[in-house]
Image (cartoon, rainbow, N blue to C red):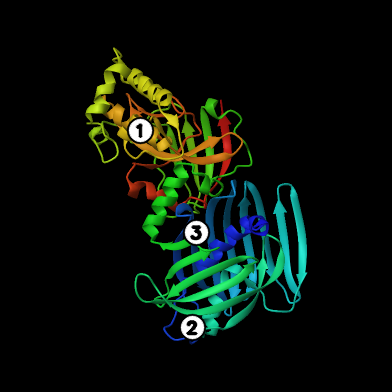
Amino acid sequence: MKAFWRSIPRLFLALFIFQQASFVAFAASTSPLPQVPLGERWFSVSMNGERTGFSRLAINAMSEGYSISCEGSVKMLVLGFSREASSRESYRVARDLTLKSFAVSQTIDGSPLQVFGERTARGVKVVVETAGSRKEKFIKTKVPVYPMAALNLLPLLQGTPPGKTIHVTVLDVESVKIKSVDIMVIGREPLPTGGTAIHLRNDLYPFVDNDVWVDDAGNTVRESVRNDLIVTEPEDAASAARFLAESAVAKRDLILDFSLIRVATPVDRPADVRRLVVELAALPAGFTLPVGGGQTVVRGDDGRAVVTVERGAGTAGETTGVQDHSVYLQETERILSNSREIRGLLPEIIGAEQSPRGKVDRLVRWVAANVGEAVTDSYSPLETLAIRKGNCQSHARLYASLARAAGIPTRFVSGLVYVSGKGFLYHSWAESFAGDWLAVDPTFAQVPADATHIKLVEGDSPEEMAAIAGIVGKISARIVEQRY
């Protein structure tokens, strides 16, 4: 058990890779596959039946081989100890899947690690970067070396008669070593849901079996580590996007490192910032950053955008003139402005206050004072009222319900907020129209919200929130200006 525990961080990352690579199309016979299939797949990771992470794999053809990109994040509790790991990996391989070059970014229990390099005629050249350290290493070898992401592909390309064992040499980027791995074809087995699947097993870690079942259509049916202690299953892209977006905004530990955006220049006093200019990079081509509520955006044509946030600047960036705000007074599935319980609280909270700005201030501070912080999200404001706990989405949803019930047009927004000592994390807050659109944060009791609030999406529906999934773990940020 001690050996298993020491291997846990590395095992997490290996799990992402093994299960991701196993989606490959599998012929009904044991004949080798003619080529590597391309595409993207998403997977969920669970421990003892509880969702603990996600992973994604994409394989694309190149002129001389393939590019393989993997990413994933997970948090697990073993023997009373918590382990968190996230990984972003990119490999270039030849047609036979032998390694050509690689770039890997890992964060294990909050400690970042960068590993990159290439295969040469005499071996593998590796560069390892950690906080304040850069080391180069050359691993001599003449045998073919494969990335771990190819482990489940190789048996399929070579044929899979039951009982066959395939010997593979792989690069372990975390330990920066070459390792020999045996992959055994157990055979074809029936599935509980009908049909059959091919069962593979590898021995990458001692005392821990890594099993994978793949059906004839090329779908990963199930992955199991240590007799179902950890189980990985395929997930459709829409469900995966919702999970990733909601987990990032809720700041769940299982993807906290994965979603964190570090910056070279720290924000000294986030709560006091009145003007912040940030350059975002690697934004998807079709991703539109909203304006208003003190935010303006200048979008470049290379995936970059310069975002300026002015605290309390109101309608900055929005079209001038009379606008119809009635949509921001309506009840939605998760903003319950017509609820009797919600409306019944207004006299107690607002009292004799008449001005819209005064009402906003009282509502924000009431929600912050009466709803404690929790990792879980109360999707219904009524549930939040009942348990008096919730994450930032719970706070923003309850506030929006109260504000709309009070006749104040309010929209639910999500984006980034700076957290001292960390960087930018995903977060939800609100904007209310009180003469101008004003950003407010009912989690942190801020009226107006500080200028580190960078709005990425408006709306609280699953479809609107899912847009965040396209940028989590991908974008970077650079502080251009901060003013107090």
- The type of residue carrying mark 3 is Ser
Disc ID at residue 33? 2
- The type of residue carrying mark 2 is Leu
Q: Residues within 10 Å of mark 2 (few under 14, many from 20)?
A: many
Tell me what residue is drawn at x 39 percent, y 51 percent.
242
- The type of residue carrying mark 1 is Thr
In the image shown, does 232 or 123 lie closer to the viewer? 232
Tell me what residue is drawn at x 47 percent, y 74 percent.
24
In the image shown, does 477 or 403 lie closer to the viewer? 403
Residue 398 image offset from top left, x and y in percent: 34, 31
State the separation of the CA atoms marked 2 and 3: 25 Å
Write down the residue under mark 3: 55
Disc ID at residue 384? 1
Tell me what residue is drawn at x 53 percent, y 53 percent.
74
Q: Residues within 10 Å of mark 3 (few under 14, many from 20)?
A: many
Quarter placement of the N terminus: bottom right
